[in-house]
Image: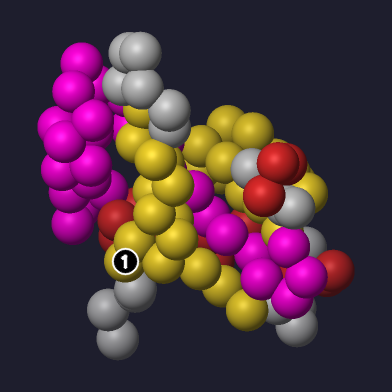
Amino acid sequence: MRAKGYRVLARRAKTPLGEIDLIARRGAVIAFIEVKARDDLTLALQALTPVQCRRIERAAQWWLGHRRDAADADLRFDLIAVAPRRLPRHLPDAWRPQG
């Protein structure tokens, strides 16, 4: 993410509502990123479930509520898929919160 111009704010951020793999900021955007590693890149891309998305969304809201410097940020939920002998694949805006 640093190579793409992001500043990493947290790795494996633990909240009472769950863990967020990676939180990064670039400009006004804060990205909450789920990292999925599988033997195949396609499987990694398909590994994120709706239940996991909702957990990450709730954890992100908790995290934001405890960070004054993030009040004006635009939020985004990304996915990074990792597989052996392949470059990681970053999907910006992989999902949007419901409601």
The answer to whether residue 65 is above or below residue 9 is below
Disc 1 is placed on an element classified as strand
User: Can residue 14 be spotted in the picture?
Assistant: no
69 sits left or right of 51 in the view:
right
Locate residue 56, reporting x and y percent.
Answer: 41, 53
Q: Residue at x 53, y 55 (%)?
A: 32
User: Can residue 7 be spotted in the picture?
Assistant: yes
Q: Residue at x 78, y 70 (%)?
A: 27
Q: Amino acid at mark 1?
A: Trp
Q: Which residues are magenta?
A: 26-52
Q: Residue at x 27, y 79 (%)?
A: 98
Q: Quadrant of the C terminus?
A: bottom left
Figure label count: 1
Give the camera-side residue of 43 and 69: 43
The answer to whether residue 57 is above or below residue 99 is above
The answer to whether residue 73 is above or below residue 50 is below
Disc 1: which residue: 95
Q: Is residue 28 magenta?
A: yes
Q: Residue furthest front?
A: 86
33 sits left or right of 26 in the view:
left
Q: Quadrant of the N terminus?
A: top right
Name which quarter of the figure residue 29 lies in.
bottom right
Q: Residue furthest right?
A: 69
Q: Residue at x 41, y 66 (%)?
A: 93
Locate residue 11, reporting x and y percent.
Answer: 64, 34
63 sits left or right of 84 in the view:
right
